[in-house]
């Protein structure tokens, strides 16, 4: 039978990456043939105690040599994967010892917020755990219960919080997935500036249209490599796994020491659920409704407005400074506009007594009509322009004494058009599906790329 291995919370802001640690497990186990691709599973991005992108990792050992293909390379040795499962000769306990050894050697144990966990199982974990972990909050005891129901061995270090992600990674079924090829640096280069050709990065999406989130044209910022001193050189994301090794070959950079192709839940919106009743803190929702108030910009450049959901709930929506040009779209909304908002409901901050729905993506479905004064009304007797009698008192013709309550009106030109809008590439969350990948019948998809 195959053996399922999940690990999480081995990195920190100061270094390491759990995806790299997985390559070390593969190396330590003497390059077994994998069943399927290694998996990079992003969990609830709103969890306050997460480290960086809140990603957990899993691999399945026990692929068949027949029909296997190369999905990576470590120090010149190919990593093979098969879609056919056979099993492994090593026992669960042997695999578990190897996993424990790698975690204890490589994890950032000295970092205060690093609390590794590893789960080694003869079977996948119940899928219900994944959906709770990606959309809500899971307690460690609950994750351990799910893991043990699958017959797993549970390993934890320090407070063991990483067990939650490790077990959750083994519960993701991957029905809705994208892919990422990650390259890694030679150890002597860790912590130094990365040598990557930015021109090659900026043209990746043009040369390989199935890749995404490569480059932020608005800020001219490459998005495929981190700024932290971790082992990662760069990662290319895409919807077609067979394209990613070819894309890697076109990026001129320092020589990677290893690379590995992952199946992921990135850019799937799996963390989003439909709002049903009042929102819960630290969860993400898609909400349809109508703009209730004019947007207001506050100190720091954050933009707030109220919307009324179709169920009559009033929500405060926020486009924070970090969303950059998306704020320009939000500033163009007016009461009565029909919108759909994808976002995270976050705790109160400052004067936000009830929290706010922090926008990750917004669809402008239909625009309200806005009327502005064109001119004073014309006298119906003499044809002259009337004069204002005073604020709120209407108009009067000086010659004929005719009166009118309303000026001539004209429809105002709107600064926003119907469409789906995402923040610029560098401001997006790993799980958020970009606007250009979001399918919504009858609505044009647009990405905010210029200054607003």
Image: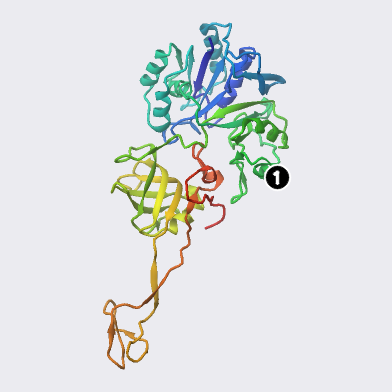
Q: Position of residue 217 (x, y in %)?
A: 61, 49
**Residue 228 located left or right of residue 409:** right
Q: Position of residue 243 (x, y in %)?
A: 66, 33
**Residue 415 located left or right of residue 274:** right
Front position in the image: 417 or 133? 417
Q: Residues within 10 Å of mark 1 (few under 14, many from 20)?
A: few
Q: How is the image coloured?
A: rainbow
Q: Position of residue 80 (x, y in %)?
A: 65, 19
Q: Secondary structure at mark 1?
A: helix
- Relative vertical location of residue 317 with respect to residue 140 in this rendering, above or below: below
Q: Residue at x 39, y 40 (%)?
A: 285
Front position in the image: 22 or 400? 400
Query: Which quarter of the figure has residue 183?
Result: top right
Query: Which quarter of the figure has residue 70?
Result: top right
Q: Which residue is mark 1?
A: 199
Q: Residue at x 38, y 69 (%)?
A: 371
**Residue 114 located left or right of residue 346:** right
How many numbered marks appear? 1
Q: Residue at x 43, y 31 (%)?
A: 134
Q: Position of residue 45 (x, y in %)?
A: 45, 35
Q: Residue furthest bottom?
A: 399
Q: Residue at x 49, y 23 (%)?
A: 8
């Amino acid at each position: 039978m195959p053996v399922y291995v999940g690990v999480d919370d081995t990195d920190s802001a100061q270094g390491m990456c759990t995806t790299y640690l997985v390559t070390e497990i593969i190396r330590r186990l003497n390059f077994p043939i994998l069943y399927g691709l290694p998996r990079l599973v992003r969990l609830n991005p709103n969890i306050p105690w997460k480290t960086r992108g809140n990603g957990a990792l899993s691999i399945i050992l026990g692929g068949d040599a027949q029909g296997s293909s190369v999905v990576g390379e470590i120090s010149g040795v190919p990593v093979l994967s098969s879609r056919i499962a056979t099993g492994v000769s090593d026992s669960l306990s042997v695999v578990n010892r190897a996993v424990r050894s790698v975690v204890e050697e490589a994890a950032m144990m000295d970092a205060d917020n690093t609390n590794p966990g590893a789960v080694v199982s003869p079977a996948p974990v119940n899928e219900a755990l994944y959906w709770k972990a990606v959309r809500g909050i899971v307690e460690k005891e609950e994750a351990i219960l799910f893991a043990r129901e699958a017959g797993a061995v549970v390993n934890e270090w320090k407070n063991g919080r990483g067990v939650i992600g490790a077990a959750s990674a083994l519960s993701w079924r991957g029905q809705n997935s994208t892919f990422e090829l990650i390259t890694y640096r030679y150890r002597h280069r860790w912590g130094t500036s990365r040598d990557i050709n930015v021109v090659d990065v900026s043209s990746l999406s043009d040369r390989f249209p199935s890749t995404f989130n490569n480059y932020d044209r608005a800020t001219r910022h490459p998005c495929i490599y981190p700024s932290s001193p971790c082992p990662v050189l760069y990662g290319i994301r895409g919807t077609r796994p067979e394209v990613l090794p070819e894309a890697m070959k076109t990026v001129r950079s320092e020589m990677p020491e290893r690379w590995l192709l992952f199946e992921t839940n990135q850019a799937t919106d799996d963390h989003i659920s439909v709002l049903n009743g009042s929102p819960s803190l630290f969860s993400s929702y898609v909400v349809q409704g109508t703009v209730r108030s004019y947007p207001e910009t506050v100190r720091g450049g954050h933009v707030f407005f109220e919307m009324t959901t179709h169920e009559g709930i009033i929500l405060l929506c926020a486009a924070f400074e970090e969303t950059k040009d998306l704020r320009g779209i939000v500033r163009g909304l007016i009461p009565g506009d029909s919108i759909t908002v994808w976002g995270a409901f976050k705790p109160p901050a400052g004067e936000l007594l009830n929290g706010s729905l922090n926008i990750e993506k917004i669809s402008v479905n239909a625009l309200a009509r806005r009327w502005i004064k064109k001119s004073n009304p014309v006298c119906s007797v003499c044809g002259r322009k009337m004069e204002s009698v005073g604020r709120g008192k209407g108009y009067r013709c000086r010659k004929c004494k005719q009166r009118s309550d309303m000026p001539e009106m004209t429809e105002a030109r709107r600064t926003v058009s119907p469409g789906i809008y995402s923040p610029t590439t560098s401001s997006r969350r790993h799980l958020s599906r970009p606007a250009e990948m979001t399918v919504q019948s009858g609505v044009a998809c647009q990405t905010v790329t210029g200054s607003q």
